[in-house]
Amino acid sequence: MRRTLAAARNIIVFALLLVVRNCHGKPGQQGTLSALKDCIVQAGSNASDIVEHDGPDYAKYSELNYQWNLIHEKKFPVAYFVVRSVTDVQNAVRCCTAQSVRIVAKGGGHSYEAYSFGDSTALIVDLQALHELVVSPDRQSFTIGSGALLGQLAYPLLEGYNLVTPQGTCPTVGIVGHLIAYDDI
């Protein structure tokens, strides 16, 4: 099981390394956001998955931007892109790079230190929809999407496969932040 978790951690970390790139530009301007959205949509992603700070669906933006830890100053990124596939992630990285827009990955968890909320110039790539769990036929390894929460890992593993993982008990902690915090799983 130790080797399985290490392999899963490496896959997740690799996926995040592909997503998290800091391109420094001045994307706070409306024209840049418009060009970024056009690029992402032309690449095949759904425009309704991009939720702007100053857009018509502020209720959805507020839900995505919920920051519970009031010890940190609240951040308001320019937009959220709720990705539904690896292709969406690739489109976001390509288009942010082309438009010189800062891109920040947000896993499924609560972002205790608020690192995944970026700043007013960032596009947040929200990975919460990428939470698929696949267990190998021999039950010796598994893969889990980078947007999964601990509860989306622990309960299906226990109920479906009688497997457990060494983790805490809070089901709303994101798997990525939890696993990369360990240096010896």
Image (tube, rainbow, N blue to C red):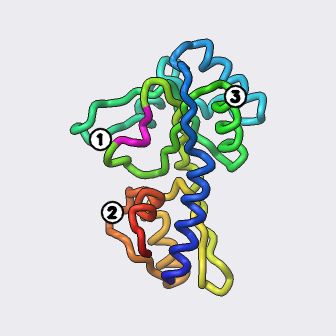
Question: What residue do we see at 57% from left, 73% from top?
Answer: 7
54 lies above or below 138: above
Q: Position of residue 86 (x, y in %)?
A: 69, 49
Q: Amino acid at mark 1?
A: Trp
Query: What residue is disc 3 on?
Result: 98
Picture quarter with the C terminus? bottom left
- Identify the mark at residue 100; answer none if there is no mark: none
Q: Amino acid at mark 2?
A: Cys
Query: What residue is disc 1 on?
Result: 68
Mark 2 / mark 1, whichever is N-terminal: 1
In the image, the segment drawn in magenta is 114-118
For the residues marked 2 and 1, what is the alpha-carbon distance in whole angstroms?
15 Å
For the residues marked 1 and 3, what is the alpha-carbon distance in whole angstroms?
33 Å
Point out the frontmost of discs 1 and 3.
3
Q: Pick whichever, 171 or 71, lies toward us.
A: 71
Would you say the magenta stretch is mainly helix, strand or loop? helix
